Image (cartoon, rainbow, N blue to C red):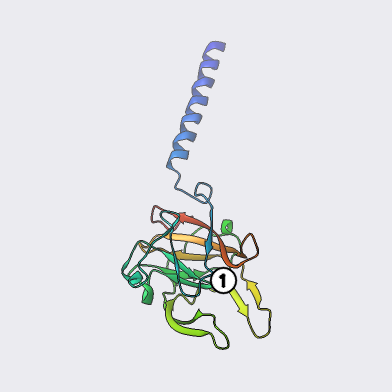
C-alpha cells in the first residue's frame, strides 16, 4: 500500500510539473520577457537628423533628401525634435501616443487608437548670431519630451518624464522614455532613451 501511495504521489508531481511547463510555454510575451534596451543618440547637429530602427536597435543610414521614401527607419532625432515614419515624414505606419505613466513597467498594452502622425514644425536649422535660421520641416508634435526656455541666458531645459508609445514604420509598437539630454561630458542634445520593442506585432508589452 505504501509503495502505491509513493507511486501515486510521484505521478502527481510529474503531472503538475508538466502542466506548469506547458503553461509557461503557452504564455505570450509580456514586459517580463521583453528586454528593456537603452540607446544614446548624438542629436547635437542643427542641420542633420539621426535615424533609428527599433527592429535592428541601431542607427540607420538614410538619404537625407529622400528620407520619406525609406521604411528602414522608425524614429529620428534633431536636437529636441522628433520625427516618426508617418504623415509628412514618410510612408510608414508610425504615430505617437503620450501616456499618463512615468515608468516603462507601468505600460502593459499599446493603445489601439489615438496616435498622432507627423505634421510640419518650425525648427532651427542653423545657430548663427544675431539671427538663427529656422525652417518648416516634417516632425512629430506629440513627442514633447524636452522643453527649452531661451528667454534669458543660459537656456533652461525641462525633461518630461512621460512614457510615449510609438508605432514603427511597419505598424509594430514600442514604448519609450527619454532619460537624459546630456552626454557624459555634459554636452546638451546627447539623447538617452530607454525602450521596449514588441517584435510580434501585438499591442502587448
Check disc 1 and report its element: helix, strand or loop: loop
User: Which residue is tagged 1?
Assistant: 145
Residue drawn at 54 percent across, 69 percent down: 44
Residue 68 versus residue 183 in the image, above or below: below
- Local packing at callout 1 (Cα closer than 10 Å; few below 14, some 14-19, many 20+) is many
Total numbered badges shown on the rendered structure: 1
Residue 5 versus residue 17 in the image, above or below: above
**Residue 89 in the figure: left or right of residue 175:** left
Q: Quadrant of residue 187?
A: bottom right
Whether residue 40 appears in this view of the structure is yes
Residue drawn at 49 percent across, 65 percent down: 165
Q: Foreground: 59 or 117?
A: 59
Residue 203 horizontal/vertical position (percent): 43, 58
Residue 88 horizontal/vertical position (percent): 37, 77
Q: Residue furthest bottom?
A: 130
Residue 131 versus residue 87 in the image, above or below: below
Residue drawn at 35 percent across, 70 percent down: 67
**Which part of the image, by quadrant, shows the N terminus?**
top right
Residue 164 horizontal/vertical position (percent): 52, 66
Q: Residue furthest front?
A: 129
Whether residue 1 appears in this view of the structure is no
Residue drawn at 59 percent across, 65 percent down: 101
Q: Foreground: 99 or 189?
A: 189
**Residue 155 in the figure: left or right of residue 86:** right
Residue 109 horizontal/vertical position (percent): 49, 59
Q: Foreground: 83 or 5?
A: 83
Amino acid at each position: 500500500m505504501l509503495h502505491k501511495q509513493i507511486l501515486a504521489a510521484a505521478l502527481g508531481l510529474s503531472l503538475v510539473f508538466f502542466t506548469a511547463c506547458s503553461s509557461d510555454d503557452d504564455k505570450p510575451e509580456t514586459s517580463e520577457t521583453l528586454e528593456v534596451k537603452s540607446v544614446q543618440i548624438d542629436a547635437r547637429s542643427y542641420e542633420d537628423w539621426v535615424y533609428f530602427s527599433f527592429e535592428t536597435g541601431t542607427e540607420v543610414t538614410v538619404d537625407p533628401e529622400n528620407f520619406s521614401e525609406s521604411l528602414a527607419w522608425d524614429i529620428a532625432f534633431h536636437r529636441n525634435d522628433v520625427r516618426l515614419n508617418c504623415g509628412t515624414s514618410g510612408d510608414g505606419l508610425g504615430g505617437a501616443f503620450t501616456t499618463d505613466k512615468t515608468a516603462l513597467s507601468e505600460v502593459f498594452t499599446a493603445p489601439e487608437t489615438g496616435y498622432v502622425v507627423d505634421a510640419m514644425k518650425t525648427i532651427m536649422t542653423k545657430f548663427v548670431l544675431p539671427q538663427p535660421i529656422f525652417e518648416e520641416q516634417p516632425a512629430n508634435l506629440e513627442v514633447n519630451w524636452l522643453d527649452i526656455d531661451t528667454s534669458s541666458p543660459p537656456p533652461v531645459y525641462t525633461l518630461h518624464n512621460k512614457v510615449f508609445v510609438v508605432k514603427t514604420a511597419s505598424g509594430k509598437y514600442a514604448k519609450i522614455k527619454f532619460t537624459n539630454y546630456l552626454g557624459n561630458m555634459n554636452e546638451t542634445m546627447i539623447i538617452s532613451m530607454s525602450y521596449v520593442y514588441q517584435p510580434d506585432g501585438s499591442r502587448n508589452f
